Image: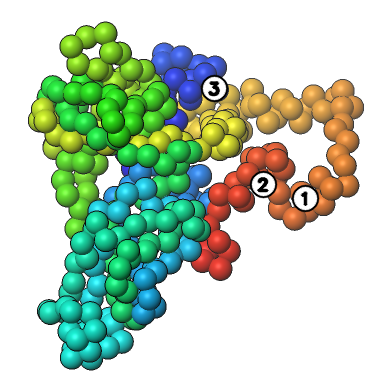
Amino acid sequence: MDFKYITLTRLRDVLKISATNLPDAEALALIEEISESLNSLTGQFFQPKIEFHPASGKGDRLVHRSDLNPIINLISISVDYDKTFVKPSVWETMFGIRGRTHVYDISRVEVTPDSGYRLVSLISGEFPAGSGNVTLNGVFGWLQNRKLFQTELAAELAVDATTITVNEVSNSTGWVEVGDFVTITVTDATASNPARVYNDIIKAIDTSGPNPVLTVDKVQDMAGVFPIASGTTVNVYGRFPRALVEVMDALILRAWEESPLNPSGSGGSGSITDRLISEKVDNYSYQLESKSVQSSRYGGLGAITGSVRLDQTIRQYSRPPMVGFV
């Protein structure tokens, strides 16, 4: 599962249906579809994801990419001579670099809050000018609260498990909370191959036993990489943006209305849409809208979720217009 922004519990609460009517496998597939829809609408993603991003040095200490998702954690940063506007002799003399690539000491690099944690700064030195000559390797994603907490698996993790046993859920670096994203990286990423990562949302935390236990929906298989061995690093990040929870609820209702799994969905005799239209006509029930709301609808607002207010929320999280949507 690539993206998962809500739990099975949340999905079923919104739809008012049980596991009998919508089994786990179908429900998880629907959650992924809805989560991907939000990505498409905004051009962003809202859970931690390990990625490699090219950026361009400007001959100073800063690298800025406005089209990036916010940087949660920078793993490494390197510069490529072949994409840099300097001669080999200048490369070596000015920057003290030998060879065609240079990997910076990550302790000399910091991600600043400027531009929503999209700005990378060298504590000393500078990034040579070039086009796409700087590669950022890190964890990206737009979260409610930007944090990183690390622990380890205290017990082997099998596929279809609903609990993850870890060594600790709090220490001097922070603590784990319900709603946080929990991530287990099974294979490392390269520039050409993404990492295999298990991602989920923490539903409950039990600290009564010898080791803390995190409850999730269901551990998903990743092409035979299970079981995951005890001692594997577990990363816990922030949570899904609070402002988008209502947006997800609206997308859930729309997706379910159009889903072939819904026996009374669009096109059916019991369709919610058909019933609402019929009731409005039969009962002469109309909703009066202000001129500002009408103007917003003419401009396209309200067309996505049915709510002008929720559509405006989506726009606040959308990628800058000059970059375009993914």
Q: How many marks?
A: 3
Q: Are marks 3 and 1 in contact (CB under 8 Å)?
A: no
Give the mark nearer the N terminus: 3 vs 2: 3
As drawn, is 66 to the left or to the right of 235?
right
As drawn, is 317 to the left or to the right of 226?
right
Taking 68 as reference, is 5 above or below it? above
Give the mark nearer the N terminus: 3 vs 1: 3
**Could you tell me residue 100's position as x and y percent?**
16, 79
Residue displayed at 24% across by 17% down = 212
Residue displayed at 21% across by 44% down = 196
Q: Secondary structure at mark 1?
A: helix
Report the disc number at residue 72: none
**Could you tell me residue 292's position as x and y percent?**
84, 48
Taking 211 as reference, is 266 above or below it? below
What's under tag 2, amino acid-wise?
Gln
**Could you tell me residue 77's position as x and y percent?**
26, 63
Residue labelled with disc 2: 312
Q: Are marks 1 and 2 in contact (CB under 8 Å)?
A: yes
As drawn, is 246 to the left or to the right of 184?
right
**Could you tell me residue 182's position as x and y percent?**
31, 32
Residue 144 seen anywhere in this rendered image of the structure = yes
Residue labelled with disc 1: 296
As drawn, is 212 to the left or to the right of 39?
left
Around disc 2, counting alpha carbons within 10 Å, would you say few (fewer than 14), some (14 to 19), or many (20 or more)? Answer: some
Residue 258 seen anywhere in this rendered image of the structure = no
Question: Closer to the camera, 20 or 109?
Answer: 109
Residue labelled with disc 3: 15
